Amino acid sequence: MRKNKQPDLAVVKSASFGSIQCDFFRKDNEIWMTREQIGSALEYTYPRVAMSKIHDRHKDRLDKFSVVTKLVTTDGKACETYIYIARGICEICRWSQQPKADSFFDWVYDILESLRKGELALIPAPQQQLPAPPSPIRQLQSPRSDEAAAKLLNARTRQARLLFNAAKDLKSVLPQDELRQMVSKATEIICTG
């Protein structure tokens, strides 16, 4: 594990694995995912704890494929976060006992290959931040509000994905300017959520 105090991370792809919104970050020509997103996608009850246990059991392998960095949440707080490159994500899936490990691995692989081949559009983002961790008190006070917010976020993600996919499917037919407008609109939908 390397320490990285000043990350230069940018979200390059945001997609849903089931009901979990996953962000793919780029830094130094590597694609990264956070520990919590991986654990959530694998449906661990306590994602950070489960990922920490897997990492501790396989420290000799996972330290090579991870970095501890400070990421800023939307409420402006900086928090130390483990992020993993593709090999680290694969290693976690290999050791995970969760039923969704294989399908998550396949999904991540497909996205990484599509990004590598240029088949998926990258999200241009001036400054990306992680969402603030949900407050347990707020969850107790307004579970319907949180559910509504999650549904809205998922709807926006689906809408943006439709635009990204349409741009991908029409790239041989539409002019580059129109494709850029579609990707820009999809990015706007995601970023304003």
Image (tube, helix red, strand yellow):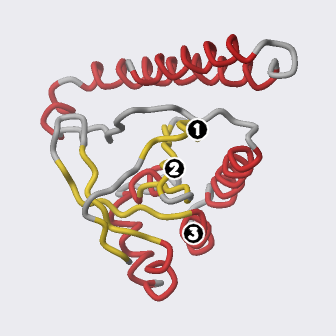
Secondary element type, mark 1: loop
Q: Amino acid at mark 3?
A: Gln
Q: Indicate which disc, 3 or 1, sits on the residue closer to the N terminus.
A: 1
Classify mark 2: residues with Cα within 10 Å, few (<14), some (14-19) or many (20+): many
Give the number of the disc on residue 18.
Answer: 1
Residue at 52% in and 35% down: 19
Residue at 63% in and 53% down: 104
The residue closer to the viewer here, 83 or 48, is 83
Give the number of the disc on residue 41.
Answer: 2
Q: Look at the picture and state if 190 lies above or below 123.
A: above
Q: Residue furthest right?
A: 172
Cα distance in 3D space between marks 1 and 2: 8 Å
> In which quadrant of the rendered image does the C terminus lie?
top left
Q: Indicate which disc, 1 or 2, sits on the residue closer to the N terminus.
A: 1
Looking at the image, residue 123 sits to the left or right of residue 57; the answer is right
- x, y percent for residue 98: 56, 62
Classify mark 3: residues with Cα within 10 Å, few (<14), some (14-19) or many (20+): few
Question: Which of the 4 image quarters holds residue 89?
Answer: bottom right
| In contact (CB < 8 Å): disc 1 and disc 2 | yes
Q: Nearer the viewer, mark 3 or mark 2?
A: 2
Q: Indicate which disc, 3 or 2, sits on the residue closer to the N terminus.
A: 2
Residue at 36% in and 24% down: 147
Cα distance in 3D space between marks 3 and 1: 18 Å
Secondary element type, mark 3: loop
Q: Amino acid at mark 2?
A: Ala
Looking at the image, residue 181 sits to the left or right of residue 189; the answer is right
Q: Nearer the viewer, mark 3 or mark 1?
A: 1
Q: Look at the picture and state if 56 lies above or below 141.
A: below
